[in-house]
Image (tube, rainbow, N blue to C red):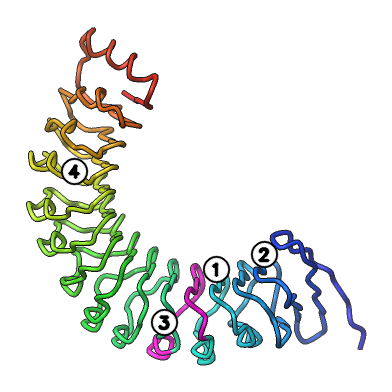
Amino acid sequence: MKTIIRILICFAISCTVFSCATRERLVTSLPGDQTLVQLERCEIQEVSIPEDNRIERLHLTYCKLTRIPSDIRRCKHLNALNLEGNQIRHIPRWIMELDSLEEISLNFNHLKLTRSDIRHLSKVKQIIIAGNNIEKLPKNVGQLSCESMNLGKNKLRSLPKSFAQLKNMKSLIFYENEFEEIPEVLEGFKELKHLDFYKNNIKEIPDFVGDMDGLQQLFLAFNKIETIPDTIRNLKRLKYFYIHHNELHFLPEWITEMDSIERFGVGFNHLLDLPDLSKMKSLKDFDCEHNLLERFPWELLEKPDMEMINARDNDFILSDEDEMRIIKANKTMNINY
């Protein structure tokens, strides 16, 4: 049988990768002397990896893989595995043998995420499985030991009760799902630093979100939220608060006491007025585009550390004095109005 040898150049690591095509399968030989190996948009069915390799980060993205290549189990130093954009359906058992593996990305595959898949991922610290059309998480999801999970672009509406066992989670991303409320099983997640429910169907922020003491980033844009509850003022470490594209009609006065907020987005709501946001000591970036504001707190222009103000598409009328202040301030910050 004739064998056709093809040479693929992997520019990301400046190495040569050999692929041998036969009638049965396409085998791609990966170098064992590199710590980073990347292949993108290559048709791969199998990979050949030397037993004694140094690979720490392996990226096989958009390679038409239907399963995770078994030779990857030889990568004893593997820390991060990126298999985005393939056609993988299941997680093999041998993934548990990779003691160094901390991060796995399976974005945009055909992952079914069964109970077995959860068991096989139980040691991984960061799990990224966005864009797999997952409708439900397995009931044993609480067996995971991960600290970061990205479940964006799926079809989730709820979380199983066992999810409550993952209280050491530091980052949770559920953007572009079908949640109508923030699930109660997240109550008590005090270690969370990043919570993202961007682009769901959420109508209100439950009070327990205000008890997430460590929260630094809260993304609730593109929902149906009408009010910000008083408990949010308890988030003393919150830096990023994005709640644009909702149904807000006012901002509470106490929001000006949140000294930790650096970036605040409330654009595309129904706001008629704003409190004096110049009192927010750390505020650097403020976006209130497309509201019904008749007045704007131009005192923000006098904050020396402001970087950006977006107040476009509102109803306020600028006085000559306001225009002069804007022109002067535009030399040090980006102002859109």
Q: Which of marks 1 and 3 is nearer the N terminus?
A: 1
Percent position of residue 240, x then y = 28, 48
SS for callout 1:
loop
Residue 212 drawn above or below residue 315: below
SS for callout 2:
loop
Name the residue carrying label 4: 259
Q: Which of marks 2 and 4 is in front?
A: 4
Task: Give me the C-alpha separation between circle 2 and circle 1.
Answer: 11 Å
Does residue 117 show up magenta in the picture?
Answer: yes
SS for callout 3:
loop
Percent position of residue 4, x then y = 88, 77
Residue plotted at (31% across, 23% down): 337
Query: Which residue type carries mark 1?
Result: Glu
Q: Earlier in the sequence, mark 4 or mark 1?
A: 1
Residue furthest out toward the top:
320
Residue 222 drawn above or below residue 249: below
* Image-based side of 313 in relation to 184, left or right: right
SS for callout 4:
loop
Name the residue carrying label 1: 84
Task: Give me the C-alpha separation between circle 1 and circle 3.
Answer: 15 Å
Q: Which of 198 and 264 is in front in this view?
A: 264
Query: Which residue type carries mark 4?
Result: Asp
Task: Give me the C-alpha separation between circle 4 and circle 3.
Answer: 41 Å
Residues packed near mark 4 inside 10 Å, few (<14), some (14 to 19) or many (20 plus) = some
